Amino acid sequence: MKKILLIDDSVTIHRVIDICIDKDKFITEKTFSADDAVMKLKNSPADIVLLDNKLEGITLLDFIGKIRSLAQDAWIILLTGAFDQFDDNDLIKSGADDYLFKPFDSQAIEAKINYG
């Protein structure tokens, strides 16, 4: 089974992920902070990382670099706000692999994580 690490400071997003992710296909770990995410990745690298692109206390490019150093093969999907100005150019600059606008539905998140 693939392992997903959700890094987002929103309780609502944590709940949505609980509902949307197929527990027969994926093991999901969740955290609200960058520091806790780093500890989790050190202990057990993830296959897929769902990362809030506006997580408090991080610089996106630096934090993605840290994730890559701990989980080189992880597929990193940024969770961006519906009103964020974010496009493919921003994705390339960030170093992530994909992005998904919040709010999202189960089919959208499933398509993204199954691709990764």
Image (cartoon, grey):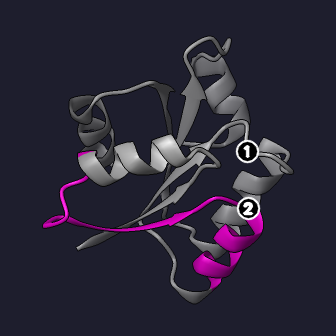
Image point (77%, 43%), residue name: 60
Residue 62 on image: x %, y %: 83, 52
The alpha-carbon separation of the residues under discs 1 and 2 comes to 8 Å
Residue 96 on image: x %, y %: 60, 43
Dot 1 amino acid type: Leu
How busy is the neighbourhood of tag 2: few (under 14 within 10 Å), some, or many (20 plus)? some
Highlighted range, magenta: 20-42
| First reached walking from the N terminus: tag 1 or tag 2 | 2
Dot 2 amino acid type: Ala
The residue identified by callout 2 is 34
SS at circle 2: helix
How busy is the neighbourhood of tag 1: few (under 14 within 10 Å), some, or many (20 plus)? some
Callout 1 touching callout 2 (CB < 8 Å):
yes
Image point (73%, 44%), residue name: 55
23 in magenta: yes
Residue 85's image quarter?
top right
Residue 48 on image: x %, y %: 43, 58
The residue identified by callout 1 is 55
Q: Is residue 59 above or below residue 106?
A: below
43 in magenta: no
Quadrant in which the N terminus appears: bottom left
Residue 26's image quarter?
bottom left
Q: Is residue 59 above or below residue 91?
A: below
SS at circle 1: loop
Q: Can you name the residue that lies furthest to the bottom here?
A: 43
Residue 63 on image: x %, y %: 77, 55
Q: Nearer the viewer, residue 52 or 98?
A: 52
Q: How many marks?
A: 2
Q: Does residue 107 appear to the left or right of 60 in the view shown?
A: left
